[in-house]
Amino acid sequence: MHEFITVPIKFNPDLLRQFATSFGEALNNQQVDVIVLTGRDNYFCMGMDLDYIATDYDPCFVAQFCNTLKMMKSSSKPVLAKVEGGVIAGGLALLSTVDFIIADETASFCLPESAFGLTPAIAIACLLERIKPHHIKYLAWTSVAISAKQALEWGVVDKVSSEASLDQDILLMSHLFSRTPANVIRESRQLLSKYSSFEDVINQGGQLLQDKLKDIQMIEKISGYLENIRLFNDEYARD
């Protein structure tokens, strides 16, 4: 059996806690073989809630986010993602911890943090296992969104499906993964962890972000970024 878990469109401490609780419950449910993450039609996830970061930020939030990613990365069960719409910033970090990603052909992927002078450190740490460094630099340095087709070519996602076949492809892959013995999943993760220490890299990325967010000028830049996208009636301001 698979369990669908909806990813919050933006993360703040409360929504992140709810998501982590749902994920943990699925891990502990012996009837669940595969966890499937879903978003919404317009956005899979937009990452950290910048309104929260700009007005009510607590440094513990970064550690909370990193711990959630570690839990997902070390999951004892396969984790799939059904991606529709945009994946932005921390949403791409979260997505990159998933085992197998199937995206709708209209999906897009973007790291916009450089627009307000912030290095997407946690997303970089998560993407390292999936894509080549020069592709990470393109995403992190340009803030340009890439298409689902480009994401497939780079390895950001594992399969691109049409709207008509997306659900069926998710069910098929969930069925295939549900037959994988638990020891194969556990031992594979152990072997792959020797390739690169995800925990070391994510800890370094989290510390870098915490240090940056201590700077009042960085918070002011984030506030300015939010104001600019509201002026353009951006989707971010409406959700």
Image (tube, rainbow, N blue to C red):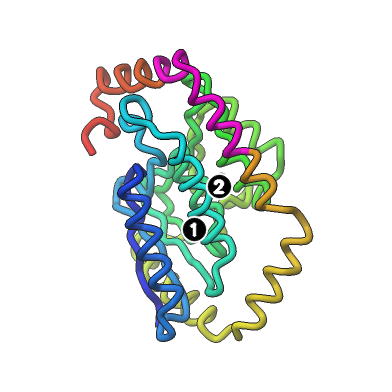
The residue that appears at 33% across and 22% down in the rendered structure is: 226
Viewer-closest of 86 and 74: 74
Q: Which residue is mark 2?
A: 151
Residue type beneath disc 1: Val
Q: Which residue is mark 1?
A: 160
In the figure, residue 86 lies in which quadrant?
Answer: top left
- For the C terminus, the image quarter is top left
Where disc 1 sits, the SS reads strand
Placement of 206 over or under 18, stated as above or below: above
Viewer-closest of 120 and 218: 218
**What percent of the width, then of the height, locates residue 114?**
52, 24
The residue that appears at 49% across and 52% down in the rendered structure is: 95
**What percent of the width, then of the height, locates residue 232?**
27, 20
Tell me which label, 1 or 2, sits earlier in the chain. Answer: 2
Outermost residue on the right side: it is: 194
Viewer-closest of 120 and 84: 120
**What percent of the width, then of the height, locates residue 184?**
67, 80
Viewer-closest of 218 and 64: 64
Mark 1 vs 2: CB contact within 8 A: yes
Residue 161 in the figure: left or right of residue 202: left
Q: Which residues are magenta?
A: 205-221
Residue 128 lies in the magenta stretch: no
Distance, label 1 to label 2, CA atoms, is: 9 Å
Residue type beneath disc 2: Ala
Question: Which class describes the residues within 10 Å of circle 1: few (<14), some (14-19), or many (20+)?
Answer: many
Magenta highlight: main SS: helix
The residue that appears at 65% across and 39% down in the rendered structure is: 204
Residue 147 in the figure: left or right of residue 208: left
Residue 216 lies in the magenta stretch: yes
Question: Which class describes the residues within 10 Å of circle 2: few (<14), some (14-19), or many (20+)?
Answer: many
Placement of 188 over or under 57, stated as above or below: below
Residue 236 in the figure: left or right of residue 174: left
